[in-house]
Image (cartoon, rainbow, N blue to C red):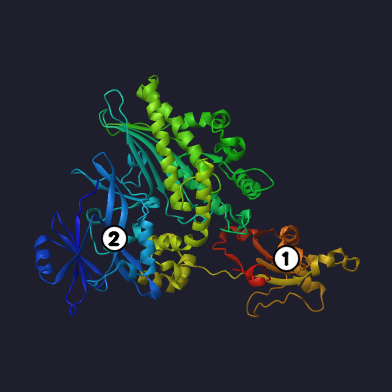
């Protein structure tokens, strides 16, 4: 079922005249003139006059996403983005829901030649087309006289407001250029949601309920599986998805039953290299003490938006083997949650899915998990409205996570959705009709499976793992290939859709440091002015940074009786007092505050040869990882003698290690931490160099 081709795109064909593009609404015959970086709305008579013989038809389109602003080296390039192929998924409440299958990206600066070939497009355009054409993006068009339903809003939120939820508004940036010129975007542009829309209908006692599962992927921290993990400084997590299970019955006074669940990766700063000698290892990119602010923001946002929270943590708890990294991450998640101010009324339920449902025993979810969440499921309820009047509200949500928030999360969310379905069928008065109940359960279970596949396709590049050894093996291999070879291109396409490639220049880096993230959507000239006048709205506080390095000769100094009287505080804290020549040099200018006696705000401490440099230690990392962890803890104790310090991050390559600590009073202000290791030995297989920023 295809939508009607509603738009026609013309381009100026006179090479001597200034280039422009005309976007015409085929029904109303009105148009938009895009010329010299401006946009004008033209009536039908104006369109006829201007178009004349000076414009040639370029293509027809179903809808327009807006104007993409790409900024290579400060010069903004504009591109019109239109939908050239789509398919209708369903119609609900006089709104047709469409899935995008292909787009076109049209330059607003130069004419497209008659012999134009898509193969000759710039690589970023190809990647953007590939991303938008993977059948994960949806939009709506009104099939009646009223406005179309906003796909970014769940039924409960729609009952309260008509304001678009920007978390799920993926082409928001593409609307901005037209808004600046007063164009009615509601009339000309669509709002695109990324995720999944599954639809079916079932016969039920002279009624035909429409069943939908709508998953909305947040664009606040969007990216691919191994490129984007954990939380960011704004409290947004990777792979955050709001999933709505909805039953709509128009013949029962427009009855709507809606149940919301959420998923999202662990809200700490962590990462996972894509291919690391055959294993994917979880690594904390920022220590828990400096993750508190982001964690609190995330939990506060969930409570404000969804009400009470129950955290379902499905990570492995085993301390050996493949679960070891998961167990450490899970433990840190639990500790952070316990210290959170909402921990008492937001249960954190640890349920090791692989252990509890070993051997594919999914029925254990009912035996072991259901009793632990039964009370909350009943108290949260679900949303219900009839004739547009709210009958009941959902008062809380289940936040489910595993490592990727894919396969295990899919299984548990399916169970929760089917459990809520039973309550919905009771309220519909058909719970005792075995045929109808079986029909609903079978259909909904199939829809949840398709929903899980689509979410997995977006984040990991393959469908979800289902328990079949043959299918799962093939998908695991495909994920490895996808994650290590294709993810970077896909990530670039995502970043361009959301921000242009503004993220890659100096202006954006400076803007991110000075301004809230939402300001990145401002025009380039505005960002320049805001950054140029930053001294008018920021205060600069000088920080004292202590930097030191120490070659510990494999740790032999600290096992030798000759050095038993030495301690690290002699070096790091009391060096100026105790030494004839201080090993830590105070570089504070004379005109500034005297440094003597003042505790540093930041310590950056490097060690060399913390393990013996033999072949075993170079190839195997077990001993040097243990040594580094021990050094890190000891250093923190030493430098916290006078004022408490917390570790920001640390990294290591064989015998070289770098530890960064910050005074606890500054912990909540630490942002944009990045650490990278560069292996230089044996053609990059082993290393003796590290870099931290």
Q: Residues within 10 Å of mark 2 (few under 14, many from 20)?
A: many
244 in relation to 580, above or below: above
Q: Residue at x 77, y 74 (%)?
A: 576
- Residue 288 on image: x %, y %: 62, 53
Tag 1, which secondary structure?
A: helix
The N terminus is located in which quarter? top left
Which one is in front, 28 or 588?
28
In the picture, which quadrant includes the C terminus?
A: bottom right
Image quadrant assignment for residue 638:
bottom right
The spot of residue 411 in percent (x, y) is 50, 38
Q: Circle 2 sits on which residue?
A: 66
Nearer to the camera, 625 or 574: 625
In this rendering, the count of numbered labels is 2
Q: Quadrant of residue 354?
A: top right
Task: Using residue 321 as the reference point, say whether residue 253 is left or right of it.
Answer: left
Q: Residue at x 59, y 71 (%)?
A: 542
Kindly identify which residue carries mark 1: 618
**In the visual, does 231 lie left or right of 677?**
left
What is the secondary structure assignment of the residue under circle 2?
A: strand
- Residue 97 is left or right of residue 462, and the answer is left
């Amino acid at each position: 079922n295809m939508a009607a081709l509603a738009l026609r795109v013309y381009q100026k064909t006179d090479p001597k005249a200034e280039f422009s593009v005309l976007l015409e609404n085929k029904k109303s015959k009105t148009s938009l003139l895009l010329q010299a970086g401006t946009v004008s709305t033209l009536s039908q008579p104006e369109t006829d006059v201007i178009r004349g013989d000076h414009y040639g038809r370029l293509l027809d389109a179903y809808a327009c996403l807006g104007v993409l602003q790409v900024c290579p080296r400060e010069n903004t390039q504009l591109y019109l983005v239109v939908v050239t192929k789509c398919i209708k998924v369903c119609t609900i409440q006089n709104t047709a829901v469409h899935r995008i299958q292909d787009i076109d990206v049209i330059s607003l600066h130069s004419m497209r030649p008659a012999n134009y070939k898509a193969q000759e497009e710039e690589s970023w355009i190809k990647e953007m087309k590939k991303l938008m054409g993977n059948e994960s993006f949806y939009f709506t068009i009104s099939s009646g006289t009223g406005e179309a339903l906003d796909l970014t809003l769940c039924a409960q939120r729609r009952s309260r407001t008509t304001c678009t939820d920007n978390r799920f508004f993926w082409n928001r940036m593409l609307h901005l250029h037209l808004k600046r010129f007063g164009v009615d975007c509601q009339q000309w542009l669509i709002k695109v949601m990324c995720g999944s829309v599954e639809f079916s209908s079932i016969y039920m006692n002279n009624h035909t309920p429409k069943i939908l599962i709508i998953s909305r992927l947040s664009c606040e921290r969007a990216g691919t599986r191994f490129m984007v993990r954990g939380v960011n400084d704004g409290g947004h997590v990777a792979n955050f998805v709001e999933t709505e299970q909805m039953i709509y019955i128009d013949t029962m006074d427009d009855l709507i039953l809606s149940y919301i669940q959420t998923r999202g990766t662990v809200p700490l700063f962590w990462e996972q290299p894509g291919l690391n000698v055959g294993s994917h290892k979880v690594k904390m990119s920022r220590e828990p003490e400096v993750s508190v602010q982001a964690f609190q923001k995330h939990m506060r946002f969930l409570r404000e938006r969804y009400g009470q929270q129950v955290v379902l943590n499905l990570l492995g708890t085993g301390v050996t083997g493949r679960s070891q990294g998961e167990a450490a991450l899970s433990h840190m998640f639990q500790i952070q949650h316990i210290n959170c101010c909402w921990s008492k009324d937001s249960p954190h339920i640890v349920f090791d899915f692989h252990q509890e449902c070993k051997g594919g025993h999914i029925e254990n979810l009912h035996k072991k998990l259901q009793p632990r969440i039964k009370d909350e499921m009943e108290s949260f309820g679900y949303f219900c409205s009839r004739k547009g009047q709210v009958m009941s509200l959902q008062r809380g949500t289940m936040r489910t996570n595993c490592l990727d928030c894919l396969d295990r999360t899919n299984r548990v969310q399916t169970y929760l959705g089917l459990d809520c379905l039973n309550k919905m069928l009771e309220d519909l008065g058909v719970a005792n009709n075995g045929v109808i109940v079986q029909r609903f359960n079978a259909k909904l279970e199939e829809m949840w499976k398709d929903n899980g596949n689509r979410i997995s396709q977006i984040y990991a590049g393959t469908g979800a793992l289902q328990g079949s050894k043959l299918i799962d093996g093939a998908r695991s291999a495909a994920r490895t290939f996808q994650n290590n070879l294709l993810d970077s291109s896909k990530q670039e396409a995502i970043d361009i859709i959301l921000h242009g490639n503004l993220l890659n220049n100096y202006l954006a880096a400076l803007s991110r440091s000075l301004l809230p993230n939402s300001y990145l959507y401002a025009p380039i000239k505005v960002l320049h002015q805001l950054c140029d006048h930053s001294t008018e709205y920021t205060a600069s506080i000088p920080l004292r940074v202590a930097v030191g390095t120490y070659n510990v000769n494999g740790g032999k100094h600290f096992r030798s009786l000759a050095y038993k009287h030495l301690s690290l505080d002699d070096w790091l804290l009391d060096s100026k007092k105790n030494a004839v020549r201080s090993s830590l040099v105070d570089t504070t200018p004379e005109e500034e505050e005297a440094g003597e006696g003042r505790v540093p705000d930041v310590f950056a401490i490097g060690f060399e040869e913390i393990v013996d440099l033999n072949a075993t230690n170079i190839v195997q990392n077990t001993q040097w990882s243990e040594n580094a962890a021990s050094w890190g803890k000891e250093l923190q104790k030493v430098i916290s003698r006078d004022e408490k310090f917390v570790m920001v991050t640390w990294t290591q390559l064989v015998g070289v290690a770098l530890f960064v600590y910050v005074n606890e009073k500054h912990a909540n202000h630490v942002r944009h931490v990045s650490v990278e290791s560069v292996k230089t030995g044996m053609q990059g297989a082993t290393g003796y160099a590290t870099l931290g920023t």
